[in-house]
Image (tube, rainbow, N blue to C red):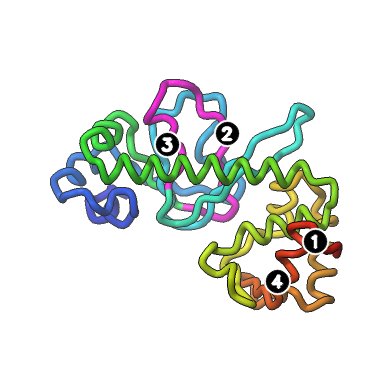
Amino acid sequence: MQVTPELLSRFDLLKPLPREALEQLAPHASLARFARRAVALEAGVREDKVCFLFEGRLQGVGFTIDGREVGLYFVEPGDFCGELALFDDNPQPEFVIATTAASVVYVARNPLREVMLNTSTVSNTIGRKLAQRVRQMTMQRTLLGLSNIPQRVCGQLYLLINEAQRKAESSEITNPPTHMEIAIMLNLSRETVTRVFQALQSRRIVRRDGPSRLIVTDLTSLRRFAQGEEEL
């Protein structure tokens, strides 16, 4: 399928670009589809492209010294990853895999880098994304250092809640990660994560509303567990 300027304009990063700039980028873009667990960006390889997610979900993952998989971040539709290629020629630091069937648009690095250098809106957006990623991964490292396992899981759930909703009494997480995906992010077993969820559900702190919504009915309690003020 040919990538059109109209398709490129659906991504937040590229939306502010004028039609002329999108037409210049379109010949350097390609569409790819991936099955679940397929690799969209490969660690250790000098990628010459940036990945924009059109449909599905991606996850950045790394591996510990003993070979265990650790989840680093999620990529949602409309977002992008692999942006470090725009700044240096070093290899891609982490794998990016599809956690569901996914469609992505690859845009060649050099043409996109030229756009970034000449368009302040694009460069500012990429800068904010990098800052967000650093903050997110710093928090992830903090969670991994917690010895209290329920606190670690509650902390991860709390991070998944939009900041604007954290002051409310209840909230919801749309398209929540599976127990296995949370386990990968926290270096735990899926069974351990499931037991924590069962405890949260029995105390009516969270409840499922189908596969695509997790309702946090008692946000105050979840926050206290996440901050270690109470034990689950």
Q: Nearer the viewer, mark 1 or mark 2?
A: 1
Q: Which of the image's four quarters has the C terminus?
A: bottom right
Identify the image quadrant of residue 223: bottom right
Q: What stretch is highlighted in magenta?
A: 80-102
The label number, if any, that marks residue 81 in the structure image: none
Q: Identify the residue under disc 3.
A: 83
User: Can residue 167 be found in the magenta stretch?
Assistant: no
Q: Identify the residue under disc 2.
A: 94
Residue 126, x across and y down, in percent: 38, 42
Separation of residues labelled 4 and 3 (CA atoms): 36 Å
Task: Tell me the crowding category of disc 4: few under 14, some 14 to 19, or many 20 or more residues within 10 angstroms, Cα based.
Answer: some
Ranked by sequence position, the earlier of labels 1 and 2 is: 2
Label 4: element kind: helix
Separation of residues labelled 4 and 1 (CA atoms): 11 Å
Task: Tell me the crowding category of disc 1: few under 14, some 14 to 19, or many 20 or more residues within 10 angstroms, Cα based.
Answer: few
Ranked by sequence position, the earlier of labels 4 and 2 is: 2
Separation of residues labelled 2 and 3 (CA atoms): 12 Å
Three-letter amino acid code at disc 3? Glu
Label 2: element kind: loop
Three-letter amino acid code at disc 4? Thr
Separation of residues labelled 1 and 3 (CA atoms): 38 Å
Instruction: Please give the name of the residue rendered at 16% of the width and 49% of the height, measured from the top-left corner.
Output: 18
